[in-house]
Amino acid sequence: MTDWIGETFTSTVGWDHLETLVDIGNRQAGSVGEREAATATRDALEAAGARDAHLEDFPIQGWTRGSSSIEAGDTTQRCIALPRSPSGEETAELVDLGYGLPEDFEDADVEGKVVMVSTNVPSWYERFPHRREKYYHAVEGGAAAFVFRNHVEGGLAPTGSVGMDAAPIGEIPAVGVSKEVGARLARRFDGEEVTVSVEADIHEATSQNIHADLGPDTEEAILITSHVDAHDICEGAMDNGAGTAMAVELARTLAAREGELDTRVHFLIFGAEEVGLVGASYAAERMDHDHIKAILNNDGVVRGRDLKFYTHGFPELKEAVNTISERFEHPMTVTPRLGPHSDHWEFVQWGVPGYHVTSETGEAGRGWGHTRADSLDKLEVRNFRESAILLTELAVHLAADEFSVAHRDPEAIAADLEAENLDTALKLTGDWPY
């Protein structure tokens, strides 16, 4: 039967929930808005047909933005603090390290200086150094402050958290500046003294994960995941309202096909992803990994028309995507390399089979993501509905008794991280668990 395809392509359930999320406003981890979004998502999952929809609270390190600035010469340059930056004011020589690659830090003396690096990397570079990796290279080098310079035009200062799991507040003040401000600082003030100031309210807070179930009451489960929090400067439509709305739409489609599910589908929508995968870490520590058949983590879907899947060295997951792609004659890209920067990773690092589902965009880096331009107008309902059809079919395929996927040994995951030159960065940022 294919009636469900037509119903999905005309459904407004998921997209309506996306509008609900973006209209809330600030969904920063630990905020009133994040709680409102979580409650609305719980209710939407229940309305879509899932059972036992509920919230699970957990404590987090709260952080609320205050004012920030860069004083350079007789000018004040606009910037925004990076979440979990400490409050502070530092006056020191500005040094522009360009891309901020590991070798850039090796070749420079950054001790006691204000370090500026770009959000992107050159196309020829073998991997993508994360923002936190660049920040902790600056910290390790004894820098006084950190400036994160966007590579996307439009006066858009980037955000994104610093800090480690063991020390949630970063060690030096950190701010983001637009491409235009960064170019101005590099042209006029490289080698000159500048003053970076950050004010932030640091406090205890509470976040929450959202749980719900569909299908048979089996001990084993497929996890469909996303994160409901977003950065406070934007609507968070792409990152990650669309992923959470997709989970709600999948609850609707899978409820209609519930009789086809051989394995329980557990919806797990995380809080506090943007400040260090805190909700996912909380859940991963409390769940029996042996009972998780596979994870379908939606983070970055709908940004483009075609889906992209990180499969983390699980050949069965790659084969499943190719099967659905061929069945629907619709392109879906598989990336077999590891992707340790979304909620799935708190499980995959221990050998649990898991996808990170995102989009092919043709862009370098996050594009509009992590800026005030992450808004609903950047997304298309057609892409949402097409992706929902493909992901529904994939979820039913994963839940079938005929599909099996072996867990991997954590030592094998660690070896892959080393082979892909990701281990040094994870050790630097405090994210190496082995």
Image (cartoon, grey):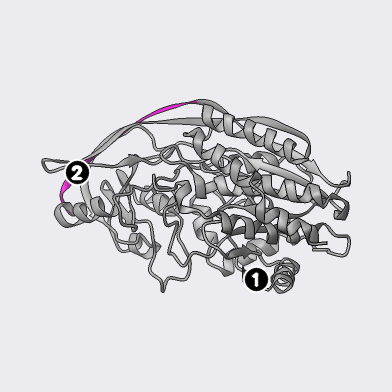
Q: Nearer the viewer, residue 36 or 376?
A: 376
> From the viewer's perspective, is residue 421 above or below residue 192?
below
Q: Is residue 77 visible?
A: yes
Q: Residues within 10 Å of mark 1 (few under 14, many from 20)?
A: few
Q: Nearer the viewer, residue 43 or 403?
A: 43
- Of mark 2 and mark 1, the one earlier in the sequence is 2
Q: Any magenta on residue 197? A: yes
Q: Residue furthest left?
A: 74
**Marker disc for residue 194:** 2
Please report the residue visible at 39 percent of the width from the left and 48 percent of the height from the top.
373
Mark 1 and mark 2 in contact (Cβ < 8 Å)? no
Name the kind of residue labelled 1 in the image.
Answer: His
Q: Which residues are the magenta region?
A: 191-203
Q: Is residue 349 visible?
A: no
Q: Position of residue 149 (x, y in %)?
A: 32, 53
Q: As drawn, is 275 to the left or to the right of 50?
A: left
Name the kind of residue labelled 2 in the image.
Answer: Val
Q: As drawn, is 85 to the left or to the right of 333?
A: left
Q: Nearer the viewer, residue 349 or 39?
A: 39
Q: Position of residue 98 (x, y in %)?
A: 30, 61
Label the magenta part by its dominant secondary structure: strand
The residue beneath circle 1 is 330
Q: As drawn, is 63 to the left or to the right of 154?
A: right
SS for callout 1? loop
Q: Any magenta on residue 105? A: no
> From the viewer's perspective, is residue 385 above or below residue 332?
above
Please report the residue visible at 78 percent of the width from the left and 40 percent of the height from the top.
49
